[in-house]
Image: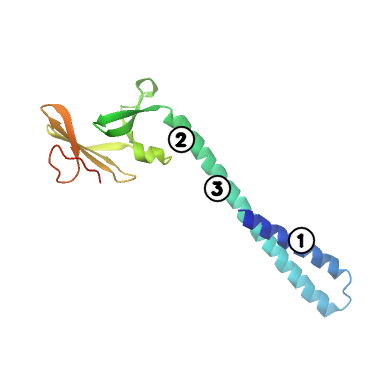
């Protein structure tokens, strides 16, 4: 962004210098060539300005997104879904009519809100997936309580994530 600003300022300075030089040109052909060069410099400056305006707009959009995410993230608290496995769970007082849900802690750390979707709800196994980062958690249950966590073909007692 700084490079674009410097290039834009350089093009404007060049154009200004060319305008000053035009005042002293009496040869029509030389003046026409100088006008064409001046138009090129003006176009370069306009392109640099346009790039800067776009970049500022993109940055303003990102700042707004991050501010909104910070406000939304305050509605959640870190919770353990199994020993050693954490997610952000919606606080009861902040549900505002929404069902209880969790979001991926990895995605939340990267400024993204991605719901953990339960794909398997069984007697021995619950499986949660994050659609954003593709993380998969298999939570094996032992005697009705949460036991070990695994992924893929892991045996109860093993732990892996995708």
Q: Position of residue 104 (x, y in %)?
A: 33, 37
Q: How far apart are marks 1 and 2 (CA)?
A: 42 Å
**Mark 1 neighbour density, 10 Å: few (under 14) some (14–19) many (20 or more):** some
Residue drawn at x 44%, y 31% is 72
Where does label 3 land, which residue?
58
User: In terms of image quadrants, where is residue 139?
Assistant: top left
**Mark 2 neighbour density, 10 Å: few (under 14) some (14–19) many (20 or more):** some
Where does label 2 land, which residue?
69
Q: Can residue 25 be seen in this view?
A: yes
Q: Earlier in the sequence, mark 1 or mark 2?
A: 1
- 47 to 157, vertically: above or below: below
Identify the secondary structure beneath mark 2: helix
Q: Residue 13 carries which label?
A: 1
**Mark 3 neighbour density, 10 Å: few (under 14) some (14–19) many (20 or more):** few
User: In terms of image quadrants, where is residue 9?
Assistant: bottom right
Identify the secondary structure beneath mark 1: helix
With 143 as the anchor, is 32 left or right in this view? Answer: right
Answer whether labels 1 and 3 touch (C-beta < 8 Å). no
Q: Position of residue 16 (x, y in %)?
A: 80, 62
- 81 to 32, vertically: above or below: above
């Amino acid at each position: 962004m700084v490079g674009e600003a410097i290039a834009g300022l350089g093009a404007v300075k060049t154009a200004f210098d060319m305008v000053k030089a035009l005042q002293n040109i009496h040869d029509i052909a030389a003046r026409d060539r100088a006008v064409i060069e001046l138009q090129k410099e003006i176009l370069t400056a306009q392109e640099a300005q346009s790039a800067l305006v776009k970049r500022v707009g993109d940055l303003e959009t990102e700042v707004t997104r991050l501010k909104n995410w910070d406000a939304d993230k305050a509605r959640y608290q870190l919770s353990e879904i199994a020993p050693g496995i954490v997610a952000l769970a919606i606080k009861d007082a902040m549900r505002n009519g929404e069902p209880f849900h969790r979001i991926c802690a990895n995605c939340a750390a990267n400024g993204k809100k991605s719901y953990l979707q339960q794909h398997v709800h069984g007697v021995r196994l619950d499986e949660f997936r994050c659609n954003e980062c593709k993380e998969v958690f298999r939570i094996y249950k032992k005697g009705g309580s949460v036991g070990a966590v695994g992924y893929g073909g892991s045996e109860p007692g093993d732990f892996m994530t995708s």
